Amino acid sequence: MSYASRSGRAKTSVSNPRAFAVCDRCGAWVNHDKLQWQTQWAGAALQNIRLLVCSECLDRPQEGLRAIVLPPDPVPIINARVEPFLADESGNVPPIGQPVGLEQAAIMPLGLNSVGAVIHLGVPISALSVVSSGTNVVTVTCSAAHGLSDNGQISVAGLTNPRACGFFSVVVTNPMIFTYETFSVIAAASLLTGTSRIVTALVGLPRGVTTIPQVGP
């Protein structure tokens, strides 16, 4: 008949006696000289958490608790020659033509204005009349407050003259009236039809450009 060892995993030697100890984690008996201190990351250094554990209970320090140490910034150079990005984007030559790929049906419902506030886009504007004065200026009179401000953007579709349709920046006359400029002169006429649709829009523009550029057909 055999018996389970009363010494757990500790080894007994008459010629080389070694102290017994209890693992702080599993409670098993092992030789004291086999226990190891458990460490854990604390910032950028390992910290002893004062647990003596056996080899089977010894955990690898959790890397998620380790601080990320960033290297120092490189030494700046003298007489650097930096690309003039602002001048490249604004330049002395204004952009020519409307941004490509603009579709009224593709206007996203939400956007951010110049101060980072969320605004609703694609909101219909209730036009009471759309009139050309015989120049490149088109005047829109609304049946309700349009809520636009100077350089606000709109998308226009379904007018009698396609040259007055597209994406435009507006100039506000009063809460009920605003104007926008087309590329070419529009003959004096009333342009509104039963299928006309004017909605708010937001077109990304190059830095330094405040109005949507126009181009002829």
Image: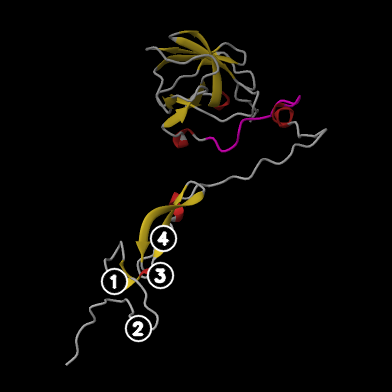
Callout 3 environment at 10 Å: few (<14), some (14 to 19), or many (20+)? Answer: few
Kindly indicate whether the residue at mark 4 contacts the one at mark 3 (C-beta within 8 angstroms): no
Please give the name of the residue rendered at 31% of the width and 76% of the height, measured from the top-left corner.
9
Look at the image and tell me in which quarter the C terminus lies.
top right
User: Can you tell which of label 2 and label 4 is closer to the viewer?
Assistant: 2
Q: Is residue 196 in sight in this rendering?
A: no
Q: Tag 4: Cα neighbours inside 10 Å, few (<14), some, or many (≥20)?
A: few
Front of the two marks 2 and 3? 2
Q: Which residues are magenta?
A: 91-102
Residue corresponding to mark 4: 37
Judged from this view, the residue extending furthest toward the top is 174
Q: x, y (%) of residue 19?
A: 34, 71
x and y, in percent, of residue 173 in the image:
51, 7
Q: CA distance from mark 3 to mark 4?
A: 11 Å
Mark 2 to mark 4 CA distance (whole Å) = 27 Å
| First-in-chain label (2 vs 4) | 2
Q: Which residue is mark 3?
A: 33
